[in-house]
Amino acid sequence: MDKFTTLTGVAAPMPLMNVDTDMIIPKQFLKTIKRTGLGAHLFEEMRFEADGSERPDFVLNKPAYRDATILVAGDNFGCGSSREHAPWALLDFGIRCVISTSFADIFYNNCFKNGILPIVVSQEELDKLLDDADRGANATISVDLEAQEISGPDGGVISFDIDPFRKRCLIEGLDDIALTMEKSASIDSFEAKNRASQPWLFKGAAE
């Protein structure tokens, strides 16, 4: 998993409430277990017409936001069914940070497991960030995870809270597998002791 320390980029405003995971990545694209390629179908039904042509009024189709790396979203983002493909699609598109007043719990947890930083702010703070994001290509926002701060284009700073363990995982790029591998010495030691004390359990096992 890529490390997340600081991020400076264009923020796309999406003030819709209750954007669910099926809106983020529709069910017909859940057949794959690959984490790549899903960005092309991010917000499929909002981004494209039935014939596959782009809807010019959708925020991520506008020239100013095509390379957005931050999404400023409405309340209860990521609700609905629990699908890890939702953060996969966001990440594959290039979104590394989502800012909202609240997130669905499973989506929130899945973001951290995939290198996306979800930030919870107050409604007043969100309104300010949405106003900043409305400036288009001039809506450059900086996120400093170590300092736990969001800096707007006018120099305003918003502080945010984050669980210390999740913060460490993002900064060091640790997903669940990497966290387990940190304990590899202890795991190897346990397996060696178990093999010595109960050898019959390993009879016929490959050495």
Image (spheres, grey):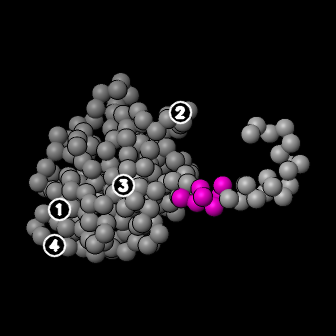
> How many residues crowd around disc 3 within 10 Å: few (fewer than 14), some, or many (20 or more)?
some
**Three-letter amino acid code at the position of disc 4:** Gly
Q: Earlier in the sequence, mark 4 or mark 1?
A: 1
Magenta range is: 182-188
Residue 131 located left or right of residue 18: left
Residue at numbered disc 4:
156
Per the model, the C-alpha gap separating discs 1 and 2 is: 36 Å
Residue at numbered disc 2:
32
Residue at numbered disc 1:
132
Residue at x-position 40% and y-position 59%: 172
Residue at numbered disc 3:
3
Residue 206 located left or right of residue 61: right
Q: Earlier in the sequence, mark 3 or mark 4?
A: 3
> How many residues crowd around disc 4 within 10 Å: few (fewer than 14), some, or many (20 or more)?
few
Q: Nearer the viewer, mark 4 or mark 1?
A: 4
> How many residues crowd around disc 2 within 10 Å: few (fewer than 14), some, or many (20 or more)?
few
